[in-house]
Amino acid sequence: MEQLLHFTEVISGLLWGWPMIVFLLGTHIYLTIRLKFPQRKIFKAVRLSIKKDEESDGDVSQFGALATSLAATIGTGNIIGVATAVSLGGPGAVLWCWLTGVFGIATKYGEGLLAIKYRQKTSDGKMLGGPMYALEKGVGQKWLAVLFCIFTAIATFGIGNTVQANAISENLSLVCAGIVNAERTKMIAGFIMAALVGFVIIGGVKSISKWCSALVPFMALLYVVGCLYILAVNSAYISEAIQLIFSSAFQTQAIGGGTAGTVVMMAARYGIARGLFSNESGMGSAPIVAAAAQTRNPVRQALVSSTGTFWDTVVICAITGLVITTSIIAYPEISQEDGGMLTKEAFGMIPYVGTPILTFGIITFSFSTILGWSYYGERAMEYLAGKKSIVFYRIIFILMVFAGSTMSLSLVWNLADIFNALMAIPNLISLLLLSGVIARETQHYLWDGNLEEKMDNHN
């Protein structure tokens, strides 16, 4: 196990070196500029996300598709992932994570546009789309589409399954410490989670969308309100925390106990990696469900999809990062060596509400992520092996929820980072090669004022 852990750390380090950071963040910035800063329309996009476009083709509403993608993205990356970035890369990682979200809005926009542009309808009327169809139909490279689906199917069991199940079981074992044996707690939690996941995903995208539409707004609102309360308690340290985040993001010398090398490299690496893990902009996962949305043209859904990154990273991750950093300043005795323990101690320092907020956030965020990613995996498997493979996939997925509850957290995170990067590479290639298509569609529908026009009339 130690050798496997070391091997995955080396591979993760190679994949998340400067080339990947430049590729990912560079794509975010390039699309932001070429598309004329679609971030300017973020509040219009929020308004569109709660409107129905029922006369259009699709399996679920635009909000249902957004809720499912948010369910997949709002997970441990928003809580433990941010703390892990801080523990490994210093407080400056929070800024890099946030910047990844701000510029990543344009990339998530582009992904959503291509998902609608190249989606296809099956014989039974179901909508299928995502990077694999953009790569096959738009770029003309089916082999890249196959690679993307292989990486997605594998990544599903990391970022979308075992990571989340592990986070829930670990948190519950800490809460129940001294009452129930830790291993027994994890097994019980794993069994209950597996049963609940099986109950929901058996109904397909409509069932998943229905549950996510109800769960996501409720869980996100309660978590944000709870974090704002903690920030009110730590209000004396907010200004200092912001200064520390900005200064350490670009600091060029290691600070006490820091990893060898420049702090800016570590902050950028872990901030951007955790930013991708959190908002998934550039990974290619969200457009898989965006393709199922009822929408009249690609740009409307692109705008709705872009709000996912806004809520996930620009809002929730930023708030979590401030909670963690203010708590570190307020309580210097907090250990920063482990992301999970840092999260627990930072929230636990707030009397009465800190631990319940953390527990509620981890359980609901993680469970919703499992639901969202189950759909991504199903579509990848269907592309690779046809509809008959879905039943087999669902059985394995449910079993892995149980298995993930007892796995090593460090190994799980390393594997998640590896397959996040492998998924992102073919998806980023499609975004860059089809950036001209994205720009033309954006110009026509968004900047020329044709947002109400149906796609059939334009094409």
Image (cartoon, rainbow, N blue to C red):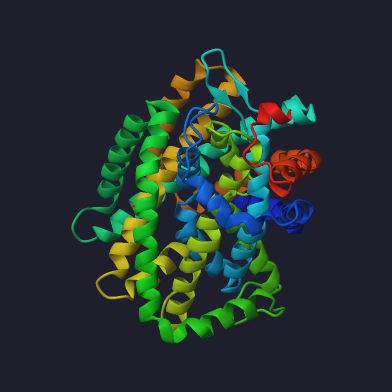
Q: Position of residue 368 (x, y in %)?
A: 40, 44
* Furthest residue in direction top, as rendered: 123
Position above or below: 306 against 121:
below
Give the x, y percent position of residue 376. 53, 34
What residue is at 46 percent from the left and 52 percent from the top? 409
Residue 118, above or below 367: above
Assign the C terminus to one quadrant of the image.
top right
Q: Position of residue 170 (x, y in %)?
A: 35, 54
Residue 179 lies left or right of residue 72; in this view the side is: left
Q: Tell me if residue 148 can be seen.
A: no
Vertical comparison of 143 with 19: above or below? above
| Nearer-the-camera pick, 260 or 216 | 216
Q: Residue at x 46, y 46 (%)?
A: 50
Is there any visible trace of residue 208 in the rendered image? Answer: yes
Instruction: Identify the residue at image location x=24%, y=60%.
Output: 177
Q: Nearer the viewer, residue 223 or 34?
A: 34
* Residue positioned most to the left: 179
Q: Nearer the viewer, residue 282 or 34?
A: 34
